[in-house]
Image: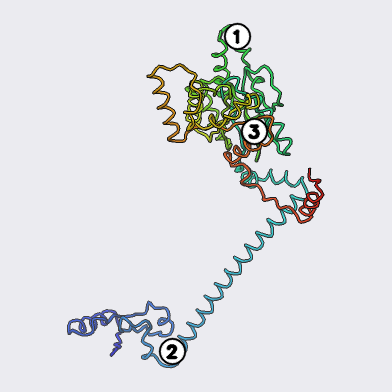
């Protein structure tokens, strides 16, 4: 049975508690004193109560009816206050979410109707920082000299125009004499191989001069960034030099790639190899190892393309599948006269490449639009281009029109 003992002072209360404990009384007793705000308000005499520890409320049985009602009113007032505060903050949060979404919708509608408003948004630092997080994209076209890099860039530039997509071509080959594509950025405006070879102090040959030009570019990245002027969602095709040592054991191309990454570029290397170079085992293993060396050196997503398929003989085209995948190396013509020792080495290298699926080649026929589309789709996937694009849904009228044209055989 719960017992309540009144004490005038804390000392007297402690004495009563010690007495109960020493006599083996209820060990669960504890005291509740006037630190409780309710009791201090209703009991001006500040009487201390000695009650059962498991009791959650003050000993209301020892308080008269008027005081109990007063305590009930105070508790009810506290409950009403807490509920009011909760409803207020919940309502404020809902209004904040609603008006924020409404403001965003208004700004989006304004941008769509007034192109000049977008310029003022860009001047706003908040919008500018948000836009700068959108990446630019770049194909880094690499490969040996004569593999068709400049022709590939020109072909892709024309194909982008047919698709209604925009791309910007950059020439990073200081030794290029002429090219068919329209280059928006040309390294020869900064430095050319002729400038280096004609310098009496440098006295460099073609190979050393090319390396000097590329190293000079790495010391003038401000010029490159100013001329490229990368913007949100820009797509670049970068024509690189054909000196193979730039991709095998020199660091200059890796430095350029790292700098482009720091400018928020998504970069993929497109390694081109002449199909005439892959017609028999000796050349095939050389081309495969060059592609593998470039891939490990640049450390970016990588795709190998077999070019000049359109100039192959009909019989070579029929066997093209034997050259696209190193796992088929046993069917590749073995015209190279290996000694027994080196034949075993070549076979071992092919097995390593096949076991780890390190290298394969995608044939590209520049005269076949379907072949170009397929190669571009693989590259876009490699660069993750289009992931942030809106899904385009054709309306019902467009579908009906296409169906009618199909029925009339006029879809062509």
Judge whether residue 223 can be spotted in this image: no
Camera-nearest label, 2 or 1: 1
Judge whether residue 165 can be spotted in this image: yes
Where's residue 228, x and y in %? 65, 30
Q: Earlier in the sequence, mark 2 or mark 1?
A: 2
Question: Quarter of the image holding residue 242?
Answer: top right
**131 or 256, which is in the foreground?**
256
Query: Which residue is located at x 53 percent, y 26 percent?
Result: 253
Q: Residue furthest bottom?
A: 65
Classed neighbour count for the residue bearing mark 1: other residues with Cα under 10 Å, few (<14), some (14–19), many (≥20): few
- Is 80 left or right of 175, judged from the image as shown? left
Query: Which residue is located at x 58 percent, y 37 percent?
Result: 266
Q: Residue furthest top?
A: 200
Q: Which residue is mark 1?
A: 199
Mark 2–mark 1 CB contact (< 8 Å): no
Q: Earlier in the sequence, mark 3 or mark 1?
A: 1
SS category of the residue bearing label 1: loop
Give the vertical position of 312 relative to 64 (above or below): above
Spatial CA span between label 3 and label 1: 32 Å
- Is 288 left or right of 390, judged from the image as shown? left
Q: Earlier in the sequence, mark 3 or mark 2?
A: 2
Question: Quarter of the image holding residue 156?
Answer: top right
Spatial CA span between label 3 and label 2: 81 Å
Q: Quadrant of the C terminus?
A: top right
Q: Quadrant of the N terminus?
A: bottom left
Q: Which residue is mark 3?
A: 236
Q: Which residue is mark 2?
A: 68
**83 or 210, which is in the foreground?**
210
Classed neighbour count for the residue bearing mark 2: other residues with Cα under 10 Å, few (<14), some (14–19), many (≥20): some
Mark 3–mark 1 CB contact (< 8 Å): no
SS category of the residue bearing label 2: helix
Camera-nearest label, 3 or 1: 3
């Amino acid at each position: 049975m719960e017992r309540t003992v009144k004490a005038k002072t804390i000392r007297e209360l402690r004495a009563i508690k010690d007495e109960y404990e020493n006599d083996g009384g209820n060990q669960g007793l504890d005291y509740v004193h006037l630190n409780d705000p309710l009791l201090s308000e209703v009991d001006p005499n500040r009487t201390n109560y000695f009650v059962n520890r498991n009791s959650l409320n003050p000993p209301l049985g020892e308080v008269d009816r008027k005081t109990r009602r007063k305590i009930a009113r105070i508790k009810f007032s506290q409950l009403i206050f807490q509920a009011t505060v909760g409803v207020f903050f919940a309502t404020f949060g809902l209004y904040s979410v609603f008006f924020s979404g409404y403001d965003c919708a208004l700004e989006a509608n304004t941008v769509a109707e007034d192109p000049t408003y977008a310029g003022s948004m860009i001047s706003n630092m908040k919008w500018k920082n948000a836009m700068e997080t959108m990446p630019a994209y770049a194909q880094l076209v690499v490969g040996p000299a004569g593999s068709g890099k400049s022709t590939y860039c020109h072909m892709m530039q024309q194909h982008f125009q047919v698709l209604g997509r925009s791309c910007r071509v950059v020439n990073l080959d200081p030794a290029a004499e002429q090219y068919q594509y329209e280059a928006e950025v040309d390294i020869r405006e900064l430095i050319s191989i002729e400038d280096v070879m004609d310098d009496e102090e440098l006295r460099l040959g073609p190979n050393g001069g090319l390396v000097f030009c590329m190293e000079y570019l790495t010391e003038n990245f401000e010029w490159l960034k100013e001329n490229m002027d990368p913007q949100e969602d820009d797509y670049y095709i970068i024509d690189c030099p054909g000196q193979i040592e730039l991709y095998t054991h020199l660091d200059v191309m890796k430095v350029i790639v790292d700098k482009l990454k720091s400018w928020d570029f998504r970069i993929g290397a497109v390694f081109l190899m002449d199909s005439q170079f892959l017609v028999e085992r000796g050349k095939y293993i050389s081309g495969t190892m060059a592609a593998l060396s470039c891939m490990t050196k640049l450390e970016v997503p990588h795709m190998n393309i077999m070019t000049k398929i359109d100039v192959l003989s009909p019989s070579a085209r029929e066997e093209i599948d034997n050259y696209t995948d190193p796992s088929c190396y046993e069917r590749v013509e073995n015209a190279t006269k290996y000694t027994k020792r080196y034949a075993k080495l070549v076979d071992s290298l092919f097995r390593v490449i096949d076991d780890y699926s390190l290298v394969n080649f995608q044939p590209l026929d520049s005269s076949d639009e379907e072949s170009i589309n397929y190669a571009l789709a693989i590259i876009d996937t490699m660069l993750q281009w289009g992931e942030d694009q809106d899904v385009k849904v054709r309306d019902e009228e467009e579908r009906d029109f296409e169906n009618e044209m199909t029925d009339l055989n006029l879809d062509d």
